[in-house]
Image (cartoon, rainbow, N blue to C red):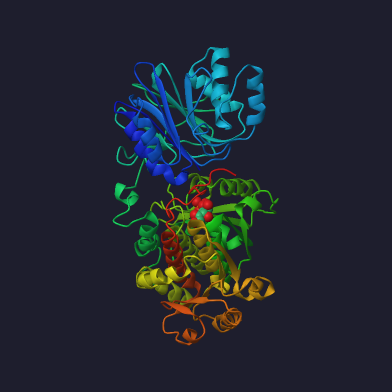
Amino acid sequence: MCGIVGYLGSNGAYEILIQGLKRLEYRGYDSAGVALVNADGCLNVHKSQGKVSNLEQTAAAGDTTGHTGIAHTRWATHGEPNDINAHPHVSQSGDIALVHNGTIENYAVLKKLLSDHGFTFKSETDTEVLVQLIEYIKLTSNCTLAEAVREALLQVEGAYAIAVVERNDPDTLVVARKSSPLVIGVGDGETFIASDATPIIGYTDKVIYLENDEMAIIKRGEPLSIVSVNSNQPSKIDVQKLRLSLAQLEKGGYDTFMLKEIFEQPNTLRDCLRGRITSDNRRVVLSGVELNKEKFLEAERITLVACGTSWHAALIGKRLIQDFCQIPVEVEYASEFRYGNPVLGPKDIVISISQSGETADTLAAIEIAKEKGAFVYGVCNVVGASIPRATDSGTYIHVGPEIGVASTKAFTGQVTVLTLFALAVGQLRGTVSPEQIEEIATALKAIPATIEETLKVDAEVQKLSRIFTYAHNFLYLGRGYNYPTALEGALKLKEISYIHAEGYPAAEMKHGPIALIDHEMPSVIIAPSDSLYDKIISNVQQVKSRGGAVVAIVSKGNTAMNDIADFCIEIPEVPECLTPLVASIPLQLLAYYIAVNKGKDVDQPRNLAKSVTVE
Ligand code: F6R
């Protein structure tokens, strides 16, 4: 979380930084700030609590000149969201400014050390400690800014992506990263830096992904220099071509990114499936599996690690892999796995699932799995992010940039890739019949069109949402493949409408949660015509007989449910393992419209950030 941007070139830095912050606002919007160094040797800092638009108002009254600058949008970790805790933080003399994404774990020790040397602190942040430490080193060692930054980073424990500028030197920008991401955009006589590539698009398509423990010294008129923070040895500079377009970052006529992303799912899944099923629908081709056949043939266990929505996709992945590959599967929250002393060996495969590819807990889980000798496979969206670079192999979901904070198209992309994965490994191990592959692959290829059809429930769901806008609690129930769908539906509602919602395996309800049911507690029950349909009918009846309202998600043509449930939403019939892909669509829409009815900011819900790069 937190987004950082930097610029050094011949254009006005302020506009570029503000536009960059707007693209990164999904990473946090508790406060925003900018520091500009101009040719007169001034370092002007503007900051403001809240969104970038607040910062623009604050900065409008001040000096925004300069061709060099850094900027930040914050998701608060240390210290409440206010103007003082907003970045950039400035050293005691006012000479050095720094922006930071990450956490400095030993900041208390460093703060004590600096206080003993007469430094005083204005904010409650860990970041201010780092900028003061850089100043202390610079003053006591009489070295350059870059040398002081490197020396300071050697003393820091934790995660960081930082950008640093200095008054009197508009020609230097120093950046570094460890665990938090940082991308450098190489323009013609200008350099951009950012937490991801989105602020850079439109200026250049040449990017460098800074590696862990590397720092870059950007000097006007000189070639870029990248060195290892630990050894100070130069690193190889690998310039890559960026494959993102500006159109992918815009709302395309929709009111919000979330709605655009919900409606874009037929197309994103087309991209996700492209080239991965043969034209006769008899084979699934995933290069990550083909290139590592031995690993998948020898595998004795698969562990899926992820967080949030990606963890829900992992639960569906478990069912798919067990059904088609007959390999035992475990699913772990990455945050629990990393501290759970997992027992792993060379016959283990760990699959990490992440939209952003930057989630700190998932990255840490990967490192542990690798240390223990497991083969690590990544399912990721953002090309070139830290997770796909850390894994042994993997598959991109290719659904394009997801900007709405609540994940929608990434979830369906992850489930699609996990289906392909299970079929590919199953066909390799001979645990899935050719008929089964053909049946599922045919339906999967048609999934974009099936979702197009499903999206026609939009108006009906919008109408339904008005009935439930002011409910205080919701229960989401599902079984088998759709228990994770229920969890995901509940998470969507919680995140954007702030209504308490719980997802439960429908049959578990009678072991406790049923006590909550009354006429004020609606239940959304996912009940497609699958192998568990008859069982779930009795769960619906249990809710109804206790006065609870039921919204049932049913397969098209199921009229029987109309007599039991209060409201039915029909979805197209698909093979059982694909039902989460279609059933999740009305759940996304229901959460969306309830939040909109309540006047909530669906793209940037309170307290959340899209990319969770801290523990
Ligand atoms: C929910 C949501 C989060 C993320 C979670 C993991 O809508 O977006 O729960 O799924 O923070 O993020 P990634 O997938 O980027 O690792």
The image position of residue 154, as x and y in percent, is 59, 26
The residue depicted at 52 percent of the width and 20 percent of the height is: 147
Q: Of residues 562 and 330, which is closer to you in this image?
A: 562
556 over 257 or under it: above or below: below
In the image, taking residue 574 as reference, residue 318 lies left or right, namely right
Which quadrant is home to the C terminus? top right
The residue depicted at 63 percent of the width and 21 percent of the height is: 114
The image position of residue 137, as x and y in percent, is 57, 18
Q: Of residues 78 and 100, which is closer to you in this image?
A: 78
The residue depicted at 53 percent of the width and 64 percent of the height is: 490
54 over 434 or under it: above or below: above
User: What number of labels is visible?
Assistant: 0
The image position of residue 321, as x and y in percent, is 56, 67
Whether residue 569 is visible to the viewer of this picture, yes or no, is: yes
Q: Of residues 457 and 576, which is closer to you in this image?
A: 457
The image position of residue 292, as x and y in percent, is 52, 56
Q: Of residues 4 and 496, which is closer to you in this image?
A: 496
Whether residue 73 is visible to the viewer of this picture, yes or no, is: no
119 over 302 or under it: above or below: above
89 over 494 or under it: above or below: above
